Image (spheres, rainbow, N blue to C red):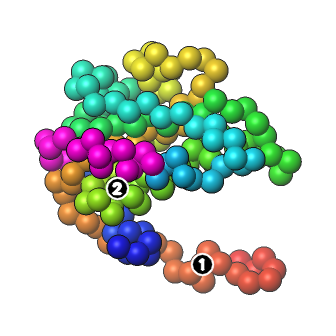
Amino acid sequence: MDVMKAIENRYSCRAYLPKPVEKDKLLRVLEAARLAPSARNLQDWRFVVVTDQQKRNALAQASYNQAFVAQAPVVIAACSVSSYVMRCGQPVAPIDVSIALEHMALEAVELGLATCWIGSFMPHEVRKILQIPTDAVVVELLTLGYPADEFKTPARLPLEKIVCFETWSF
Ligand SMILES: Cc1cc2nc3c(=O)[nH]c(=O)nc-3n(C[C@H](O)[C@H](O)[C@H](O)COP(=O)(O)O)c2cc1C
């Protein structure tokens, strides 16, 4: 599959089959994260991979009861151990972790899997469930598994609404 096909076929999957993700596929998805770029090549991301059903139930509760979080056979807690702020003023933690997460999401498509980013969660609860130390920040969760729902064509703004050339002209 070429990259654009994976991009076109990715969608937020909110229903999963009760089929575990094979170890080799899971490792491929994680490898895609490992290869992501990061500021200063800090690689300051840390990923807690959760397959235990009780923990997934707890994570679903901590995600304001988004039930599909418990249904997904894998939930990945994407964390950062960096407090580094770039000279442009932006913190690297959410940026680096997000790039790695989207690498995972695209590799998942390649492997016939599906994902959903989860930003609606209580970080202090996730920290407790997964015993994440206070020097790490939980940036996002990502559900992963075989989809039980259908691809939905995404609603997106046309290019001319989001892109201009040479000077700001929105
Ligand atoms: C940073 C981020 C956080 C998100 N958090 C949630 C979430 O908590 N629950 C959820 O169902 N979807 C969540 N989503 C999925 C978005 O709603 C979805 O990407 C958007 O509606 C576009 O749809 P698509 O991913 O199917 O193209 C999140 C996506 C991103 C990028």
Tag on residue 161?
Answer: 1
Magenta stretch: includes residue 16: yes
Question: How many numbered circles does the render carry?
Answer: 2
Q: Position of residue 96 (x, y in %)?
A: 62, 47
Label for residue 31?
Answer: none
Between residue 31 and residue 77, name the one nearer to us: 31
Classify 35 as above or below 60: below
Tell me which amino acid carries mark 2: Ala
Residue 71 relative to residue 4: left or right: left
The tag earlier along the polypeptide, 1 or 2, is 2
Quarter of the image with the N terminus is: bottom left
Q: Is residue 65 visible?
A: no
How crowded pointer 2 is (Cα within 10 Å; few <14, some 14-19, many 20+) is rated as: many
Please determine whether, in this image, residue 150 is positioned above or below residue 118: below
* Residue with the most extreme front position: 24
Which residue is label 2 attached to? 108
Picture coordinates of residue 161, whole percent (x, y): 60, 78
Residue 57 vertical placement versus 159 (above, below): above
The answer to whether residue 19 is left or right of residue 103 is left
Residue 51 lies, in percent from the top left, at: 28, 31
Looking at the image, residue 112 sits to the left or right of residue 115; the answer is left
Residue drawn at (57%, 53%), measured in percent from left and top? 36
Residue stretch in magenta: 15-31
Observer able to see residue 89: yes
- Which residue does the image show at 78% across and 40% down from the upper left? 85
